Image (cartoon, coloured by chain):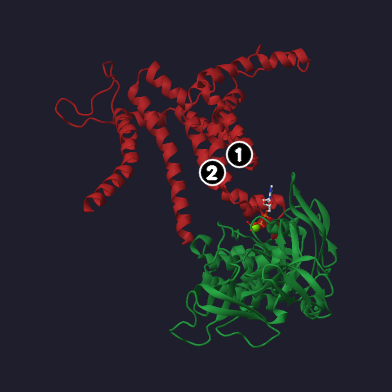
Chain colours: A green, B red
Amino acid sequence: MEYKQEQSKAAQEENSSFIRISNVSKHFGDFVAVDDVSLDIGKGELFSILGGSGCGKTTLLRMLAGFEVPSGGSIEIDGLDVTRLPPYERPVNMMFQSYAVFPHMNVEKNIAYGLVKDGLPKNEIRKHVDEMLELVQLGDFRRRKPAQLSGGQRQRVALARALIKKPKVLLLDEPLAALDKKLRERTQFELMNIQYETGITFVVVTHDQEEAMTLSSRIAVMDKGQFRQVGTPKEVYEFPDNRFVAGFIGTINTFHGSIASISEETLSVYSDELQLTLPALGTHPVEVGQEVDIAVRPEKIFLSRDEPDNPDDVRIQGVVDDLGYLGNRSLYRIRLANGKIVQVSSQNRRRSVTRFLEWEDKVWISWRPRSAVVLVD
Amino acid sequence: MAGSVNRDNLWQRVAIATPYLWLLLFFLIPFIIILKISLADPVIAQPPFTPTFDEQGALSISLDNFRFLLTDDLYAITYLRSVVIAGIATLLCLALGFPMAYGISRAREQTRGLLLLLIVLPFWISFLLRVYAWMGLMNNHGVINNTLLWLGVIDAPIQMMYTDIAVFVGLVYSYLPFMVLPLYATLERMDLDLVEAAQDLGATRTRAFWDVTWPLSRPGVVAGCMLVFIPAMGEYVIPYLLGGPESLLIGRVLFDEFFVNRDWPLASAVAVVLLLLLVVPIVILQRNQARDAEAAT
Ligand SMILES: Nc1ncnc2c1ncn2[C@@H]1O[C@H](COP(=O)(O)OP(=O)(O)OP(=O)(O)O)[C@@H](O)[C@H]1O
Ligand SMILES: [Mg+2]
């Protein structure tokens, strides 16, 4: 199946598991913040942990950093069991959600702190600090106190301070959350460059799916303390493992149905909602008759006024319920005969002042047979 | 529109002026009166000092009282003793108060309120009563001695009352809350991520405390120390009730000059010098802090 071919490149390259999280749990009293999580992360990966607020992302990161001791399970980094090591003995550094830049030290002292604690000679510390200041482009601000820096500059101080010890793993908790949109986009690429240049393994926690998609070599989607899917951004987006992941990452249209037949290539699903039998790709073993959802991304759906002629495509008629112009693309809400709304997104490739479709226009929606996936749970 | 802006301005000015007005009324004016008396001569009359302007309207002031303070060693020694005793009491309060404030600020939210309540609870009882209670505890036949005797730890009562120890106990006990509260306020506000960041970068728990927690709690330490040191310097009741007759402190001298000797001018001079002793270091401290802040820019 296609899914197999799409197997994560990163995972193949990094057969060695640099960070090995095995059956790790964290309980706060009765509350289970992280629930029996296992994960291998390869050397040099830029790995993202993506999930909604309160799903346990920070807690997991804090266990990697050594601020929380797991209630169960073990953590290995580069072959060393660190499960119970205090933070200052781990080959790991962390960039805090709040940045936690020391307010009483200037930029230079903040960045140098880790090396001073390691007892490096002064001239060497100075050399490394200069390197870091250059890397994060803060050379002109070395004597400033954090209070005199902008949010983006503070973020870079925090990054430089965490990088200067050349940790084996850098943990970043919502590194871009406090920045405005423009700065966030620019900083994203800076982060990726820095990761590439230093070759340090990055584990990034974020609740922003777009950020996770752009940044990462692989993503773990987390919910209620558990991983719901681990894979490359493409895998997670194109082949969501379950309804949660499908709904969490991007928008997706789902139709209820049951498996009609199974072939080597695709599954055929009868949708009671649409009263149609549709082809779809599966990623899980299924049986004939099993209840499933069929899911299609909005940008995989085409719109046309006339009936599309390719007989293999899924074709359904509807009317335009609502439309929105977003500059680079337009969003449409198409109402089907049974009242169900389907979201469609299309690129605005041609510049035109007149709209191609108007409210209540009759349209055909269609998608390729391999555009739909089956969601089991 | 214009009217409302003006009114806003007015209120702003009133708000800014209020503390100054307060200081003027209850601090500066009384101080000027005291200063004036300190420059007069004592007379047996009502009031017991010479007027600033004599019958001819000429200015009649002298620095005799201040000169007298310099000639008699007693005053210098007493001032010094007061500084030392208040200083030691302040350090003791800091040593006891810091761990207390730290513990409270790191306690669970529900417990925190209770612990703070316990800190301020003694204020519900009159200060004088609490000092008397300590007399009852530290007497030769007081609770502590009796208990120790009964337990057989000691054969004869330990002399606690009328010693410097008793003065320190009294001072520390009375002023500890003034140390704990400002310390708690700074520690509670402190971002715990900072301490964790230090640990993450290679500092042990102890190191992280000295590198981060301690320097960042400086405003609380300074405020607490001032709140303890200043009243302890002029303290009268505690040394009078708990201290020995030879433990003469400046508060006692001040009281005696005023009420026993009825030498108001000399007493006023003592008070003026005491005030300078307190104000000068505070001004220097604030200058330093302002300079630090400026150096940061
Ligand atoms: N020290 C603690 N004691 C009790 N509960 C905690 C503690 N730390 C975290 N939790 C709980 O564990 C859950 C997960 O918290 P965590 O901070 O890991 O979430 P998160 O995924 O990072 O969320 P966010 O995106 O909001 O930062 C939350 O419900 C939180 O209330
Ligand atoms: Mg978090």
**Residue A195 x, y percent position in the rendering:** 68, 75
Amino acid under disc 1? Ala
- Determine whether label 1 and label 2 are within 8 Å by CB: yes
Q: Is residue A30 left or right of residue B242?
A: right
Name the residue at 22% across, 50% down.
B3
The secondary structure type at the circle numbered 1 is helix
Name the residue at 34% across, 37% down.
B23
How far separated are the C-alphas under marks 1 and 2? 10 Å
The image's mark for residue A237 is none
Displayed quadrant of residue B20: top left
Do the residues indicated by labels 1 and 2 lie within the same chain of the protein? yes
Q: Is residue B237 above or below residue A73?
A: above
**Residue B184 x, y percent position in the rendering:** 57, 40
Within-10-Å neighbours for mark 2: few <14, some 14–19, many 20+: many
Name the residue nearer the viewer: A346 or A13.
A346
**Residue that label 2 marks:** B220
Pair 1/2: label in front: 1
Amino acid under disc 2? Gly
Q: Is residue B46 above or below residue B57?
A: above
Q: Chain of mark 1?
A: B
Question: Does residue B91 appear in this view?
Answer: yes
Displayed quadrant of residue A157: bottom right
Q: Chain of mark 2?
A: B
Q: Is residue A22 above or below residue B34?
A: below
**Residue that label 1 marks:** B101
Name the residue at 25% across, 50% down.
B4
